[in-house]
Amino acid sequence: MTSFPQGFIWGAATSSYQIEGAAHVDGRGASIWDTFCATPGKVARGENGDVANDHYHRYPEDIATMKELGLQGYRFSFAWPRMFANGDGAREERGFAFYDRLIDSILEAGIEPLATLYHWDLPQALQDKGGWENRDTIKHFADYSAAVVERFGDRVKKFTPINEPWVVAWLGNGIGIHAPGKIDRKAAWAVAHHTVVAHAASTNAMRSVRSDILTGPVLNQTRSVPDDINDPIQANAADLLDAISNRFWMDAFMYGKYPQVVMDKFGDELSPWIKDGDMQAATVKNDFIGINYYFDNRVGPSLGGKPEWHSISGLFDLDIDETPRGPLTDMGWPLTPEGLESLLVRWYKEHGDKCPDLYITENGAAYDEGPSADGAVHDPRRTDYLATHLKAVSNAIAQGSPVKGYYQWSLMDNFEWALGYEKRFGIVHVDFDTQKRIIKDSGLWYRDQIKNNGASI
């Protein structure tokens, strides 16, 4: 028997660069993803977000679909370069006006917005000055945060500053498979620390404008699970990967410090970036923590295949392999719902009454089913993925974890970063040639769970 509390928010999520399109419309400035996509060899098939889902023009249709699904919450992101083309103080009012229209339409549909300020589309003009390695970007981000809340805080009451800072640091600046495409471990440590400082600066800036908003980080989290817990190489690697993936940001926000294993091994690379007052500022009160969860990482000996495309183990000279076993999604990710339950219970047990409310701000699976002869999209694997992971959330709630909502990733098929348009996460199918939308079977199933608050999962 599943258990979800009254008031539990059932939602779905998207991000600006992945769906908006209109990349060169109404004064929008270039982002690092525009530049990355234009760099040969960086994105599959040379694809880009210039058009994507054309959500900039089709948002009324998309919000009507959200309403048809019965969504109670919608997590979206603002495009920083749409409102501040160069990331500085020069405003583009047409960008602000778009988000006025979008937010008003979301609210008119009876849906609660959860807004992310930064989902990876940094203004290219700021990257030209060093991007997140440059501490000046933190000040620009705080100014942008205040401007967003000043304009939209009367209608949007939940904000998250930075989506998945681990990805910003390590995939963007450590191994370079995301924009800006840098391969530099020292740079990645700088960016990782600056996202911590930027989160605090953004939070304080937003609260200086309005005291009635709720804010919190959104962190992608995973367990690193050894094949053999008694093998010291695997155990040490799992501990370090957990420190880098999970505890780096959790410890900073909860305790104002970084994991000791990180400082012991990489303090000479990280410490120069830490300025007086940074770690005290990091403990700014968070009203909630958003968790993006997809899969657990395997830690073990090589299985003979090539390393996972997103693996960062090589950066730390770890003699382990993360190639997963078992059935995989189209992303090559394993099915490990038990990891989601474990993480949710872990933070509740570790922090007790001090644990902020938790939201699953992303969770979903990529499968490539398209329309059948009957015109419908039958995607039973995605339905099964959602059912098993929602059951994991219910189990965690039953153990006391304060989980208050679930935002499925993603509302629609969209631009999947360096992998282009081939990987489909949506519960709504999108034909990128015609822009036709079809609610998949998984979306219809999810609609039914929303209706009965998950009682039948």
Image (cartoon, rainbow, N blue to C red):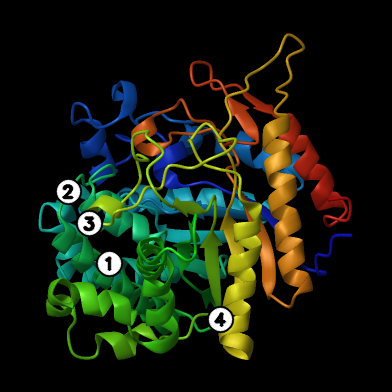
Secondary structure state at the residue bearing disc 2 = loop
From mark 2 to mark 3, how far is it between C-alphas?
18 Å
> Distance of mark 2 from mark 1, alpha carbons?
14 Å
Seen in the picture, residue 393 relative to 279 is either above or below; the reply is above
Residue 10 can be seen, yes or no: yes
Q: CA gap, disc 4 to disc 2? A: 38 Å
Q: Secondary structure at mark 1?
A: helix
Residue located beneath label 3 in the image? 317
Question: Which residue position is annotated with label 2?
Answer: 182
> In the rendered structure, which amino acid carries the disc numbered 3?
Asp
Q: Residue at x 39, y 48 (%)?
A: 301
Residue type (three-letter) at the residue carrying disc 2: Lys
Residue denoted by label 1: 192
Residue nearest the viewer, comparing 28 with 287: 287
Mark 2 or 3, nearer chain start: 2
- Percent across and percent down for residue 136 are 16, 70
Where residue 92 appears, as percent x and y from the top left, is: 30, 52
Marks 2 and 1, the one that precedes in the sequence:
2
| Residue tagged 4 | 212
Total marks placed: 4
Residue at image position (54%, 76%) is 213
